[in-house]
């Protein structure tokens, strides 16, 4: 899958959870959603992108993806 598509998907998920005022809870929600819903290859690709550049990811998406990388 194209990284642009994965970035858009991660940012869209982040936008949904951004309504949560506690950003730690929001980031956890994004992480859990990606963990449950994305194929492992997709997760590996977005984690690699986040480590290399990550500039197109929203702050919330970056935080959530970093949590995935630590899991």
Image (tube, helix red, strand yellow):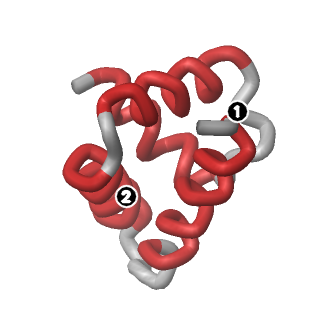
- Give the number of the disc on residue 19: none
Is there CB contact under 8 Å for labels 2 and 1? Answer: no
Q: Residues within 10 Å of mark 2 (few under 14, many from 20)?
A: many
- Give the number of the disc on residue 30: 2
Quadrant housing residue 22: bottom left
Q: Residue at x 68, y 38 (%)?
A: 2
Q: How many numbered marks are there?
A: 2
Query: Helix, strand or loop at disc 1?
Result: loop
Sequence-first tag of 2 and 1: 2
Give how far across and how far down residue 65 sits, in percent. 45, 38
Give how far across and how far down residue 44 sits, in percent. 43, 23
Can residue 43 be seen here? The reply is: yes
Can residue 28 be seen here? The reply is: no
Q: Residue at x 61, y 28 (%)?
A: 50
Quadrant housing residue 56: top right
Residue tagged by mark 1?
Answer: 54
User: Quick one: 39 or 20, which is closer to the camera?
Assistant: 39
Position above or below: 12 against 58: below
1 relative position to 69: left or right: right
User: Quick one: 68 or 24, which is closer to the camera?
Assistant: 68
- Outermost right residue: 55
Give how far across and how far down residue 71 sits, in percent. 22, 26
Quadrant housing residue 10: bottom right
Give the Cα distance between marks 2 and 1.
16 Å
User: Quick one: 19 or 15, which is closer to the camera?
Assistant: 15
- Outermost bottom residue: 19
Q: Residue at x 42, y 45 (%)?
A: 64
Query: Helix, strand or loop at disc 2?
Result: helix
64 relative position to 51: left or right: left
State which quarter of the image contains the N terminus: top right
45 relative position to 28: left or right: right
Position above or below: 28 against 64: below
């Amino acid at each position: 899958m194209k990284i642009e598509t994965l970035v858009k998907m991660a940012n869209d998920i982040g936008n949904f959870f951004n309504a949560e005022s506690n950003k730690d809870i929001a980031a956890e929600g994004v992480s859990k959603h990606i963990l449950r819903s994305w194929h492992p290859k997709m997760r590996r690709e977005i984690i690699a992108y986040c480590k290399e550049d990550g500039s197109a990811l929203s702050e919330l998406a970056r935080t959530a993806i970093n949590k995935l990388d630590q899991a």
